[in-house]
Amino acid sequence: MRLAVVSPDNHVLPRWGNSFAREGIQGDISKMETKLLNEEVTGQVQQIFTDLKEPVEMLFFSQKANCEYCDDTLQLIDEIASLSDKIGLSVYDIDADLAIAQQYKVDKAPGIVIAGRDGDQILDYGVRFAGIPSGHEFSSLIHDLILVSGRDSGLSDETRQFLSQLDQPVLMQVFVTPTCPYCPRAVVLAHQMALESPMVEAEMVEAMEFPELSNRFGVSGVPQTTINSGAGTVVGAVPEDYLIAEIRQSFGK
């Protein structure tokens, strides 16, 4: 499966590039002696995490069968969680903990939910990852932790107003690959909208890990944002107003 990378007209988010790349990482987390994040990246992330405001919880969902990157993903987010006492980590099995997976609408493994935490209460904002956030998507994960911790989407007033008036649900699935430098912009924008509105859910989907889903929605270039199971499609990393227009069109409005 070969996917093209679609360049946007706008500047991309700051990123680590392939500081953490997926290729060549294998093995059970309990048996791995080498950390995935080197000291330089760890130091940078710790510095960024000084901006964390409210507590965040990462909910991780694995699967015993047919999940090549579950162990790697768990090790990655465990290392990230260890860098701040404001980040918690809960680990589940998508089959054994089916009710919890359904509660958070996780149906793929590895799956990650980035939620807020208020005491014992988990605040689900519909911010999800399906597949390992490696390569450029590592920056999406770090950005989302800061985003959810701040409890502020950072979107324009016009976008906030549109989202506040939604009367039907929106599901955005942003298809990416680890080597795509433009994908984090599309992922973070979708997650910003999910944080802003309880009517919106947004999921990063690693296209190569879930080829059947990618084929179903005709993914040939990344990033691709599929809206409500194909009712709308955006290819490339686009501005807020462009994505809003496509959401409107997917409603037939």
Image (spheres, grey):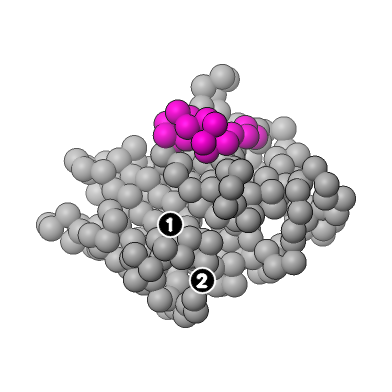
Magenta segment range? Answer: 89-104
Q: Residue at x 59, y 34 (%)?
A: 92
Q: Is residue 80 visible?
A: no
Q: Which amino acid does label 2 sit on?
A: Tyr
* Image quadrant occupied by the C terminus: bottom left
Residue 182's spot in the image, x, y percent? 51, 71
Mark 1 Cα shell of 10 Å, populated few (<14), some (14-19), many (≥20): many
Q: In this view, does 99 lie above or below 119?
A: below
Residue 89's spot in the image, x, y percent? 65, 34
- In front: 147, or 38? 38
Question: Residue 165 falls in which quadrant of the image?
Answer: top left
Q: What residue type is labelled 1?
A: Leu
Residue 107's spot in the image, x, y percent? 44, 44
In the rendered image, residue 111 lying in the magenta stretch gets the answer: no
The image's mark for residue 21 is none
Q: Is 131 on the left-hand or right-hand side of 34?
A: left
Q: Is residue 214 above or below residue 169?
A: below
Question: Of marks 2 and 1, which one's residue comes earlier in the chain?
Answer: 2
Which residue is situated farthest in the top direction here? 120
Q: In this view, does 75 lie above or below 238?
A: above
Q: Is 201 on the left-hand or right-hand side of 72?
A: left
Mark 1 falls on what kind of element? helix
C-alpha separation, residue under disc 2 versus residue under disc 1: 12 Å
The image's mark for residue 189 is 1
Please give the residue where the numbered disc 2 appears in the rendered image: 182
